Image: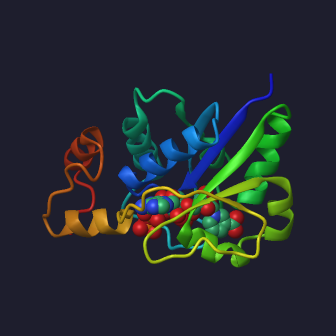
Amino acid sequence: MSKKIGILGGTFNPPHIGHLIIANEVLHALRLDEVRFMPNATPPHKQKDEQVTTAQRLKMLQLAIRGIPNMTVETIEIERGGTSYTIDTMEMLMEREPESSFYFIIGGDQVEYLPKWHRIDELVQKVQFVGVPRPNTSIVTAYPISTLTIPQIDVSSTLIRNRLMNGLTTKYLIPDRVNDFIQKEKLYEI
Ligand SMILES: Nc1ncnc2c1ncn2[C@@H]1O[C@H](COP(=O)(O)OP(=O)(O)OP(=O)(O)O)[C@@H](O)[C@H]1O
Ligand SMILES: O=C(O)c1ccc[n+]([C@@H]2O[C@H](COP(=O)([O-])O)[C@@H](O)[C@H]2O)c1
């Protein structure tokens, strides 16, 4: 039977409650079968953080979603390596799973950035994008994407990294297991 699969691509450096909340909202609103969290290898448009390895980002993501029904990790971009252009990934996934329909979830910052995405005109014809609101960004766009109204969560990985670097608490902003891993591996210290 045909499956409806949400893809939440990201850098997840580290994963936080904003990611979990948007994935859960889209899962339920669109009645998806699952949402896959998909860590990139090299992000297409931002500086790679050389202090945190791909393996560490993957581990944090696995810890973040452990035990949550209908949420999984998709490792296709890590296995492919190099710059993770979404068009390449979605073409691979669609070829691998021709029966499934894919919904690529993005926050408002990425909705605004869509004009700069690699081969975006082709990509929006192939894959249904779902834009969700994020503070200080807009989900209004000329591209043919769906949008959802969900609670806005003012949390980012940048905020988490900055709080950790300044010795501030990140409890409840990221899952406890991720916090424990960050402490154990001494990530995001100055
Ligand atoms: N709080 C949030 N609300 C809505 N969308 C979000 C939120 N946090 C992340 N996203 C979306 O999740 C996807 C992956 O985000 P990413 O892993 O880059 O986290 P980030 O918090 O944006 O990271 P950074 O602060 O390092 O740029 C992107 O589409 C982003 O727009
Ligand atoms: O393909 C592109 O050109 C492209 C440009 C910007 C972002 N993306 C993807 O969008 C997702 C969110 O990106 P980021 O940087 O916010 O983690 C992630 O899967 C990126 O690979 C993709």
Is there any visible trace of residue 54 in the rendered image?
Answer: yes
Seen at 26% across and 70% down, the residue is 162
Residue 50 shown left or right of residue 30 in the figure: left
Quarter of the image where one finds residue 114: bottom right
- Say above or below: 92 vs 86: above
Residue 50 at what x, y percent from top left?
Answer: 42, 65
Residue 59 shown left or right of residue 119 in the figure: left
Quadrant containing ligand 2: bottom right
Residue that protrudes farthest toward the top in the picture: 1
Q: Quadrant of the N terminus?
A: top right
Residue 9 shown left or right of residue 51 in the figure: right
Is there any visible trace of residue 119 in the rendered image?
Answer: no
Residue 140 shown left or right of residue 65 in the figure: right
Residue 54 at what x, y percent from top left?
Answer: 48, 51
Seen at 82% across and 49% down, the residue is 91
Quarter of the image where one finds residue 122: bottom right
Callout count = 0
- Say above or below: 71 vs 46: above
Seen at 49% across and 55% down, the residue is 150
Q: Quadrant of the C terminus?
A: bottom left
